[in-house]
Image (tube, grey):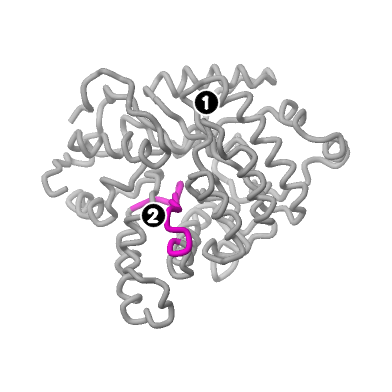
Amino acid sequence: MEDIAVKPLSARSPKAKKSIIDCDIHIPSVREEVMGYLSRHYREQIETFGMRLPSQGAMYLNGAKGGVMQEQKFPQDGKTSSILAYFQAEHLDKYKVEHAILTGIGDYAIQTTPDPDYAAALCTAYNSYMIDHYLSQDRRIKGSVMIPKQDPLLAAREIDRIGDHPSIVQVIVSNGAEKPYGNRFYYPIYEACVRHNLPFAIHVSMEGIGINHPPTGAGHVNHYIEYRMARTQIMMAHLASMIFEGVFDRFPTLQFVIIEAGMLWLAPYIWRMDQDWKALRSQTPWVKEPPSEYFRKHVKYSSQPIELPPDESLFLPLMKAINAEHSLLFASDYPHWDFDSPTKAFPKMDSAMWDRIFYQNAAELYGLPPRSSDTEGATA
């Protein structure tokens, strides 16, 4: 990576000529259509008592419409087909997105309720709705399996139900959790992921909500900006847990994806894990390699939100330190207010590096076909 030419951070890349893969997409669901996938028992409960899910709304003091960009005007006619047409025009076509990974059709609050049977029913409903109304309507759109992680056996059942669907590419959970994800409690989920060759993805959300623990070790926070800062702390704990509890030794083919937690913080964190492992490795003898090796072999992470250093000379060394050329996945977080435009989020870079981040890394991880576009490479 030493020969990659990174231009000043103030000079953003113009619109790319090649198509891309966007690895973090949130588009609305239509509740009335989702309800059709639930049993009468749950439909009547919802009609009488509402969704009965814990809310993260109190932490989203970040603008109207749940943090969606103000300029995004999703159709309000109650039809998923209208939302899909809008998304196709305003994002897929506009930015030449060859594959879009949906990470937010089902509400992550499903994973915070203490009722695992209800959570399982909702996951099945949202997953089926996603397949019928999005994945089956546009080959570019790929899906993530929402699971009731409160009950790993029910979660594994849902993975087995749809894990072999050709447009399902990963299993997804929220960052907020009852236990760190290295805990053996979650092994049935990883066994199912391995059975279907699906990565396990953690998306920031639901920290301190419902049955999940507070968003920091010091308790709850007062402001949304503090909440955003706390998310990385929790993701750090999950990453360390998965490495030191031996998840990747027990499941050597499992791939782990970090979504929407940033990226450059990973460099000093990996260094710290390696240093402490050398001094304390006798406590975890099953961890045969330095943590940095497990990270290199098993971990991918999305770009949004990108931390850009004030000193532009630091950017390239940090990208090298986190193995970005082979591990970083472009993500826009569409349509949220902190959306990263594919044409503006990154500094200009060498076309080979751009191609890895914006297409090849995700294609390899998710088993997607080579780029179909015949146009020339990215603008450098």
Q: Which mark is residue 298?
A: 2
The C terminus sits in image quarter: top left
Camera-side mark, 2 or 1: 2
Separation of residues labelled 2 and 1 (CA atoms): 36 Å
Q: Residue at x 32, y 56 (%)?
A: 296
Q: Which residues are magenta?
A: 248-263
Decide which of 184, 13 is in the foreground and name it. Answer: 184
Q: Residue at x 35, y 75 (%)?
A: 277
x, y (%) of residue 279?
33, 81
Q: Earlier in the sequence, mark 2 or mark 1?
A: 1
**To which residue does mark 1 refer?**
72
Which residue type does callout 2 highlight? His
Q: In which image quadrant can residue 49 be found?
A: top right
Q: Are the two marked residues, 2 and 1, in contact with CB atoms closer than 8 angstroms?
A: no
Which residue type does callout 1 highlight? Gln
Give the farthest residue toward the left. 3
Q: In which image quadrant can residue 280 be found?
A: bottom left
Q: Is residue 127 left or right of residue 121?
A: left
x, y (%) of residue 179?
60, 65
x, y (%) of residue 344?
31, 33
Decide which of 249, 83 is in the foreground and name it. Answer: 249
Q: Is residue 145 left or right of residue 79?
A: left
Decide which of 70, 190 is in the foreground and name it. Answer: 190
Mark 1 residue element: loop
